[in-house]
Amino acid sequence: MQRRTNILSRLDWTTVILWLAMMIMGWLNIYAAVYNEQHTSIFDLSQRYGKQLMFIFAALVLAVLIMVTDNKLYFFFAWFFYGIFIFLLILVLIIGKEINGAKAWFEFGPFGIQPSEFAKFATGLALASYLNSHRQSSDFRVMAPATVIIMAPVLLIALQPDMGSVITYFAFFVVLFREGMSIYVFISAILALTLFLLTLLVGNVPVALGLIATAVLVMLVTSGFPLTLKAMVGMILAGGISFLAGHYLLGLDIAGIIVMAVVIAGMGYAWFFYRLKLKIPAIIYIYLLGGILYLFTVDYAFHHILQPHQQTRINIVLGREQDPFGKGYNLNQSLISIGSGGFAGKGYLNGTQTKFKFVPEQSTDFIFCTVGEEWGFIGSMVVIGLFVWFILRLLVLAERQRTTFVRVYGYGVASLFLVHFFINIGMTIGVMPVIGIPLPFFSYGGSSLWGFTILLFVFLRLDAGRTEYLG
C-alpha cells in the first residue's frame, strides 16, 4: 500500500488533468457533431457519443491498470510487446477487415480494433530499449538498426495501405535526432520535402537545372574553378558516356542526358574536393547531386505509389487543382465550418454545418471543425493552448529522466502527439493534405483513444517510478 501511495504522490497530476480535460472536451464535441434530437440519452450506444463515453470509461480503467503495474514489466518485455504487434500487423493484412480501402482493422462484432494505433507504444518501447543498451554511442552503426526498428511497422502499415498512420511513425526520427543522429540526416529530410513540393509545383526539369546551376556556382566560389587537364578530360568522357548510355540504352531526352552527364561528372568532382580535403564543398556537392537524382524519383512516386485520391488532396493543398464538390469537398466544407464560427462561435449545439451533416467524418478526422464552428476562435485557441501545454509538459518530463530508456520513450510519446496535433488541425484548415489521422482524445474511436492512453500512461508510470532501479 505504501508503494502505491508513493507512486500516486509522484504521478504528474498536471498531465493527468490535461488528459481528462481533453477527453471530456472531445466527448462534448462528438456529442455536438452527431447530436440528434430523437436520441438524447448520453448512454445511447446506437450513437457515437454513447460509444465514446464507454470508450472513455475503458480508458480510465486502462490508466489505472497501467499505474499499478511494475515499471520493470515495460523495461524487460519491451521487445516482447514489439514482436506481438509486428505479428498483429502481419495478421491484419491476412484476416483484417477492409474499411475505406485499408485492411487495417480486426472486427469484433460491432467494434473494430486497429493494431497500428497500439503498435506505437510498442515501437517506442523497443526503440527505447535498443538505444538504452547502446547509450555510449550514436554513430551510424547504432542509428541504422534504430531506423530498422521504426521502419518495420511503417512498411507493414504501408501495405494496408494506411498512409496517414505511416506518416505519424516518422515522429520517432525526432527521437533519434535528440539522441545524436547526424544533423545531415535532419537536413536531408527537410531538403527532400522541399524538393518534393518544388517538383510538384514547377516540374522536375526546372528544379534540376536550378540545382545544376547551384552546383556550378559552388564549384566556382569554393575552389576557384580548379579544372586541371585530367578533370576536363574526365568531364568530357562523362558527357560522352552519358550521351551514349542515355540516348541508346535508356532512351532519355536531352534534359535527362544533361542531368545524367552532370551527375556522373559531379561524382568525380565531389571526389576531387574530398581529395583536396575540402570537406564542406564536397558535402554540399554530394547534397546537390543527390537532390538531382531524387527529383527524378518524385514524379514516379507521385503518379505510381500514391493513390489517386491522395494525389488529388496534395494537388488541392498546393493550389494545382480545384475540386470543391469532389475530392476537395471535405476541406472546402471544413473551411466553411470553421470560418462560420467567427470570434466567439455559434454556441454549443448550434452549429448549422454540424446539424445538417455538411462535413463528412466530422466526429473523427474533422472533429476540430465542430470546435471552430461552435466555440469560434476563442474555443479553438483554448484547445490549441491545451495541446501545446500538454506536449511541452511531456518534453519537460522526458528531460528530467535519469535513464536513457525512459527519456527516449518520453520523447517518442511527445513527438507522436505533436505530429498528430499538427497534421490533424493543419488538414482541417487547409495547410496540410487530408490524410485521415485522429486528433488525440478528441476524435471518435476506441482504438485511437485507448492507444493514446496506453502510450501516455506507460510514460507517466515510468516517470512516477523514475527513482526505481530498472536493471
Image (tube, helix red, strand yellow):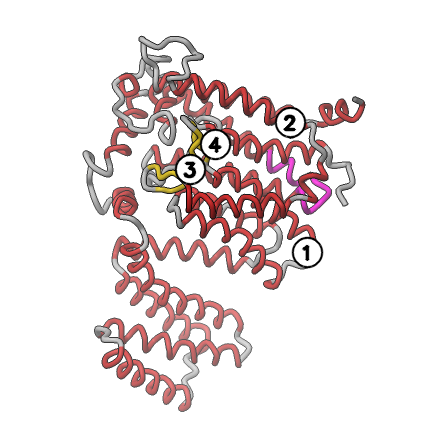
User: Helix or strand or loop: what does disc 1 sit on?
Assistant: loop
* Residue 158 placement (x, y as % from top left): 41, 49
Tell whether label 1 touches label 3 (CB within 8 Å). no
Circle 3: residue type: Trp
Q: Residues within 10 Å of mark 4 (few under 14, many from 20)?
A: some
Residue drawn where x is 36% and y is 73% of the image: 216
Gap between marks 2 and 3 measured at Cα = 25 Å
Residue wearing tag 1: 134
* Residue 344 placement (x, y as % from top left): 37, 17
Q: Quadrant of the C terminus?
A: top right
Task: Say which label, 4 or 3, has the lower sequence index.
Answer: 3
Along the line of sight, the residue nearer the viewer: 127 or 408: 127
Gap between marks 2 and 4 measured at Cα = 17 Å
Q: Which mark, by number, is residue 105?
A: 3
Is 399 contained in the magenta span? yes
Circle 1: residue type: His
Residue drawn where x is 36% and y is 84% of the image: 235
Circle 4: residue type: Ser
Region rendered in magenta = 394-406
Q: Which mark, by number, is residue 65?
A: 2
